[in-house]
Amino acid sequence: MSMIELLVGVTIFGLAMLPLTWMGTSQTRGAYSVGKHMMAGQLAASFVDSLLGLPYKTCLEKIDKLSDRGKIRVLDAEELQNTLKTITEAGIQKDMETSFRYFRCQYGYTNNDSKRILRLDIEVFYRVEESDEKSEQSVKLSVLKFGERNG
Amino acid sequence: MRFQPHNKKGNVTIILLGLISVMLIMVMALSKRMTGHTQLLTLSDYTQITRYFLESYAGDVLQQINMNVNEPDSELYDAFRGSPGNKKLSTKFYDPAEMLKRLGDELKIELQLPPEIVFSRSEELGYPAGFDCPNELKGQEKKGLLEIVCRAKFHGRQYSLRVQYPFTVVMRLTPVLKDFMLFVDKIAAEQGRDKIGPNDHLNIMFTKDGKHPEEVDNDVLSLAGNIRIKSGFKYRPFILLPPLDEKEYNSSELSGKVFLGPSDEAVYLNLAGDTREASADAAATTSSDEYAASVGEMFLVSPETLKVADSNKDFDFVPVFMNKSGGFVRMIGQDVMLKHNHIAKLGLLGFSNEVVPETGEIFKDTAYLAEDFFNKSNGAGEFWQKLEGFGHGFMAFSSGLKLMGIKPEVGGHSRRQIFGNVLGRFFVLTFWWPPSGGGEPLKYDETRSPSDFPKREVYGSVTYSFQPLLDSQKYQDFMSRMVSGKNWNPRSSSADSLPDGFMPINADYSKASKRIFTNIDFKANDGFAARAKLEELGQNWFLVENDPKKIGRGIESRVGKTYMSGEEFLEAAGVKQDKFKVNGVVYVKGPLKLPPLKMSNDKIGGGVVLVDGPITIDNITRGYDIDTTQFKLGPAGNMLGRGPAYDFYKKIKTEITQESFLTFVSLRGDPITIRGEALIGVHLVCLNDQNGVPYDQIMWSSGVRKEIVFIGGIACNYLNLPKRLEEFGSIKSSCNLLRAPFFLYHSAMAAEKPALAVQMMENMRGYLLTAGKAGSDEDE
């Protein structure tokens, strides 16, 4: 085997490896992104569920306040803060804080007062590339909450 | 060194290609795996989005069921009230909310209509001890599960959500208790041990000239030491008016029963009455509004009360004895025929200023003293002895509570049933008139020989003797006395064996006699019977078990909704939308402050509001334009079947039904304060004694300035009557006859068929979300 042959081989191998490496990186990033997406979905669902659990009026007051705040860090959300407070192990708490560092959420609502129907919209944003603000993606959940009507 | 040609030339290339191929395969496998992940993630997203959409859909169906199920015209109304079974419900009522449709459009979810609604389980609700539910009503109160199936299509997949919601069907009013216009199960405690005198807080209504003057004469007050009422304060009686409708007047089921308890204590009510003639009670001719009628309650006494009176003829206005100027002292009573055409005059007197020896006219200018009739010291009757000790002034005070209303113009009183050991107290003055030589009182003497009747020698030659018509008649049957004049202990003998000399206020029409009614005699118009003491029924029904694992069989098992504040409840009831929908039994963590409820009956959904805390109630006028000053207490003849009050009642009699009747319960005995003058179609309940002694449970605020009109029922442990009469006294009244609040029972409370309310609970059960390919029933 000549040196040229070896060089050609290595070059071909290198060239062949480039897309493969890119693909690998892309897949890893994808897997990471899937994780984030799932976390965002879980967060959105838990925010929705916690609002659904409130009495109608309290829910309306709460989402009204939250929607005024625009896009907020999920770590500032009351529910997540409460969860973090319950975690005593510093490592896990730090991990969670790191994981949700770039997660944001935004609340919106529409209220039909006469029919006592409240539409809740919760969107949780995450970054595919943590350093790149433009890589932000989101998961949005919408649900209707019905105020009690005894007739 | 030189490279040698090798027979394995090109192997490296092959190896490299192989390596690349392996890596490609690995990358492809990884890529496929990641694609799988992404697909799973997409599916998970879709499922989550659809789940919330389907939950919204089910919520919408539930809300619309709630809206329709208690509307008498709706299909659902009958479906829930019918016999239980796993039947499918019509979904014609359902029209998806605009917001739901819009959400579906935005999410590109295809809403599949109609939903499927099926009763999946149903069982009868039980009753606590003592409540005997008639067979025809058994099973009408029930609990069960309603299954709702909602479907939607999203991205080619069909999603289906199956949820079950619990429901109950309950009576809108409290069984048994609703048949009582007034239910006070511990009122005996308001009379003290003596049952007369300063600790008697029931007989405190000053009576004079056939009226209840708002303020008490000072000379009488000085003769009634330590009486509970205060000088300078105004008082007005608590009068339970008889029904204004003739049919209800003559019905023991519809006239609103009364219970004064407890069942093992006696309650004595002083009947008001003086020597006024019946003609004094007639309406004045000058103005239709002016009356000088008596508030006398002697109409409650019928001849069969007195053993020797002739029960075939009514009492009349008779001369009983003479004064010094030769005139007769007349009063209601009867001439009792004796042998040889002799006559014994039985005169009846109630409690009034005129009867007080020191201030009244009865014994003035006569040769007799009260002790000539009632004896004195140890020879006198028990309560008379006490009266002598406490002061004769107490004779001017009659009961502040008038259970049968005021004297009817014609005929007897209404057929209202009085439960409990409620005894009417009044005086009998017996005077014997021999043919000549004047007469003599038959003095109270329990120790006298029963056959020792008086004799009188006239002109030294003729001796007349008092000889009753029947040999079985005793001296004690004739003698003067205070009827219900002893402190009878119901614990020592049963109500059926009430000793002679007592008059139960209750009248047993079927037997034409007066006797004590106990729970055994209770029969509601809807068929409910009472198999326990009435006070126990109240406690059993409102019992809240302390053990969270147990649920009381009364109200606790019927609670449909729980509100954590009064405001939350008012919002759900729709007060902002000018509605007040209770529609069932709801628990409210108090306090509850009700605004005026001016909405019409169709906007009110009847039910029971259990409040854990104090309650404040404003006017409940139900859309009626009520001028309470029109509700004047005229003689019953002017109210029964005619007059403005009757006209109003006639209107509300049919318009207010159990469907819109409201019950407010202070669950832990906190006070219910009434801030409005008009409460129409309301049942107030406060039966959880917090103190063990009388205290304010249901009271009228000092802010009430107009005349009170209350149409409904009251159930409590205590009235704390002096305070109530004082509250009533502080209200101005334009009524000439009797300035008192207007309390009426509403016969809808005693309807033959109890109204039912359906309550849907929001806590889902049996949650099942499934997904399958569109057009396929196969679940995945």
Image (cartoon, coloured by chain):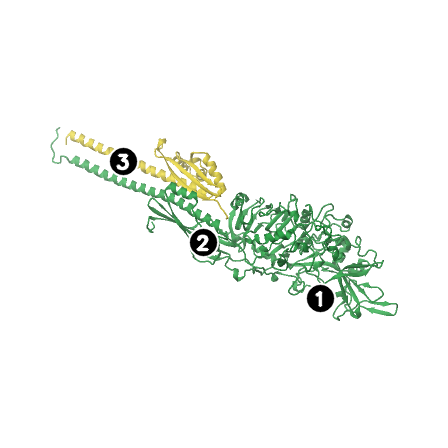
Picture layout, residue B44 above or below residue B557: above
Q: Nearer the viewer, mark 2 or mark 3?
A: 2
Q: Check if mark 1 and mark 3 are on a common chain.
A: no
Q: What chain does badge 1 belong to?
A: B
Q: What chain does badge 3 belong to?
A: A
> In the rendering, what colour is chain A?
yellow
Of the residues under marks 2 and 1, which one precedes in the sequence? 2
Q: Which residue is mark 1?
A: B312
Q: Which residue is mark 2?
A: B145
Q: Is residue A111 left or right of residue B454?
A: left
Three-letter amino acid code of the residue under disc 3:
Met
State the residue at coordinates (75%, 70%): B470
Depth check: B79 or B188 in front? Answer: B79
Q: Position of residue B498 (x, y in %)?
A: 68, 63
Q: Is residue B763 left or right of residue B608?
A: left
Picture layout, residue B641 above or below residue B577: below
Three-letter amino acid code of the residue under disc 1:
Asn
Three-letter amino acid code of the residue under disc 2:
Leu
Q: CA distance from mark 2 to mark 1?
A: 62 Å
Badge 2: residue crowd in 10 Å (few <14, some 14–19, many ≥20): many
Report the disc number at residue A23: 3
Q: Is residue B313 left or right of residue B33?
A: right
Q: Chain coloured green: which letter? A: B
Q: Position of residue B64 (x, y in %)?
A: 46, 48
State the residue at coordinates (74%, 70%): B472
Badge 1: residue crowd in 10 Å (few <14, some 14–19, many ≥20): few
Q: Check if mark 2 and mark 1 are on a common chain.
A: yes
Q: CA distance from mark 1 to mark 3?
A: 115 Å
